[in-house]
Image (spheres, rainbow, N blue to C red):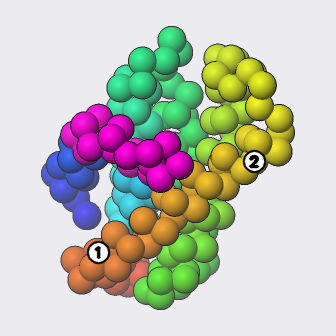
């Protein structure tokens, strides 16, 4: 996946996340930027994926209106680094390989984001550690499943094939 397609995808996520997703019930609402960051981390070359995931987090920081900008951007960049390290070791041509890489690569940084939001921004003042862990598991599970489905198309499989053939960097 090239930069033009990545920027179009991020713009599409921005439009959908800011208009359509807010109409969904809270318990069903996926984090579109997290899904986009996972998909870009799976499909783009390693260094490009880090920058694209950072950009996705930065866009979400800007759209959210939080007083501090950069928390999600740093966490999504860390997520792309973890996914980049994991995807070298796992077969991404099978759906369960992509799902495993997405879950293991996205969970620690997203939990770190929630801890940052809880203790630095005061976003979840009454949340316990268990609630933060369950919130992170729920969001990352949604994102991993949607990213696995999104990377199951023939276009993304050709990009995965190129990456598996050695175009990792």
- Where 42 falls versus 149 (above or below)? above
* Rendered-image quadrant of the C terminus: bottom left
- Residue 168, label in figure: none
Residue marked by disc 1: 156
Residue marked by disc 2: 133
Part of the protein shown in magenta: 14-34
Residue toward you, 164 or 19: 19
State left or right for residue 57 relative to residue 129.
left
- The overriding secondary structure of the stretch rendered in magenta is helix
State left or right for residue 115 relative to residue 27.
right
Q: Residue at x 51, y 64 (%)?
A: 144
Q: Residue furthest right?
A: 129
* Rendered-image quadrant of the N terminus: bottom left
Are discs 2 and 1 less than 8 Å apart at CB? no
State left or right for residue 82 relative to residue 116.
left
Q: Is residue 27 visible?
A: yes
Q: Residue at x 23, y 52 (%)?
A: 9
**Crowding at mark 1 (Cα within 10 Å: few <14, some 14-19, many 20+):** some
**Is residue 20 rendered magenta in the image?**
yes
Which x, y percent locates residue 111? 69, 43
Q: Residue at x 38, y 46 (%)?
A: 24
Which x, y percent locates residue 28? 47, 53
- The quadrant in which residue 57 appears is top left
**Crowding at mark 2 (Cα within 10 Å: few <14, some 14-19, many 20+):** some
- Where 28 falls versus 117 (above or below)? below
- The label nearer to you, 2 versus 1, is 2
Q: Secondary structure at mark 2?
A: helix
Which x, y percent locates residue 88? 55, 74
């Amino acid at each position: 996946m090239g930069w033009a397609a990545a920027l179009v995808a991020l713009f599409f996520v921005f439009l959908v996340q800011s208009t359509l997703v807010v109409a969904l019930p809270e318990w069903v609402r996926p984090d579109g930027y997290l899904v986009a960051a996972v998909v870009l981390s799976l499909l783009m070359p390693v260094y490009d994926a880090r920058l694209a995931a950072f950009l996705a987090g930065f866009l979400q920081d800007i759209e959210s209106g939080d007083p501090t900008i950069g928390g999600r951007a740093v966490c999504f960049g860390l997520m792309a680094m973890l996914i980049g390290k994991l995807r070298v070791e796992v077969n991404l041509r099978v759906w369960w390989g992509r799902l495993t890489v997405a879950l293991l690569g996205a969970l620690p940084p997203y939990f770190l984001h929630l801890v940052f939001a809880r203790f630095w921004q005061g976003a979840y003042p009454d949340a316990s550690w268990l609630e933060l862990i369950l919130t992170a598991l729920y969001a990352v599970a949604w994102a991993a499943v949607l990213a696995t489905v999104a990377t199951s198309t023939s276009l993304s499989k050709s990009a995965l094939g190129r990456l598996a053939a050695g175009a990792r960097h």
